[in-house]
Image: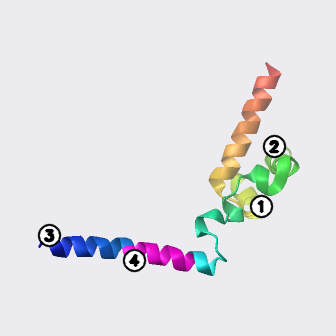
Amino acid sequence: MAEILQAYSRYGYTLVATRRALEAAMAGGRQPEQRTDLKQRSLLVRFGRRGVEQLVADHLDRGLTYTEIAEKYDVALSTVSKYIQQAKRQKAEAAV
């Protein structure tokens, strides 16, 4: 029984290693984890400081909802919330 479990364990590790090697070969030699998906990157990296300021201005100055902003910029709703709340905190701290 132990031999069967040991063989199965080796098979599982070999299968994972083979899949990773195949994915690396398909990605041109790079591991898939190294490729960054543009949607997953920080808004500062994706849009730059001006883009984030524009996103915040859409809410504070133009009155767009978080949902409308998320759809407009094709970002997650939680990301929109994060940057707008951060801007509001900074604005409040500057006023004090």
Residue 15 is marked as: 4
Is residue 64 shown to the viewer in this render? no
Residue in the foreground of this view, choosing between 76 and 42: 42
Q: Is residue 25 magenta?
A: no
Residue at image x 28%, y 70%? Answer: 9
In the rendered view, does 29 fall on the left or right side of 6?
right
Residue 73 is marked as: 1
Of circles 2 and 3, the one toward us is 3
Q: Amino acid at mark 4?
A: Leu
Of circles 2 and 4, the one toward us is 4
Residue 60 is marked as: 2
- Marks 2 and 4, how far apart at CA: 52 Å
From the image, which quarter does the C terminus lie in? top right
Residue designated by label 3:
2
- Marks 2 and 3, how far apart at CA: 65 Å
- Marks 4 and 1, how far apart at CA: 40 Å
Extreme-left residue of the structure: 1
- Region rendered in magenta: 14-23
Of circles 4 and 1, the one toward us is 4
The picture quadrant where one finds residue 40 is: bottom right
Q: Is residue 94 above or below residue 45?
A: above
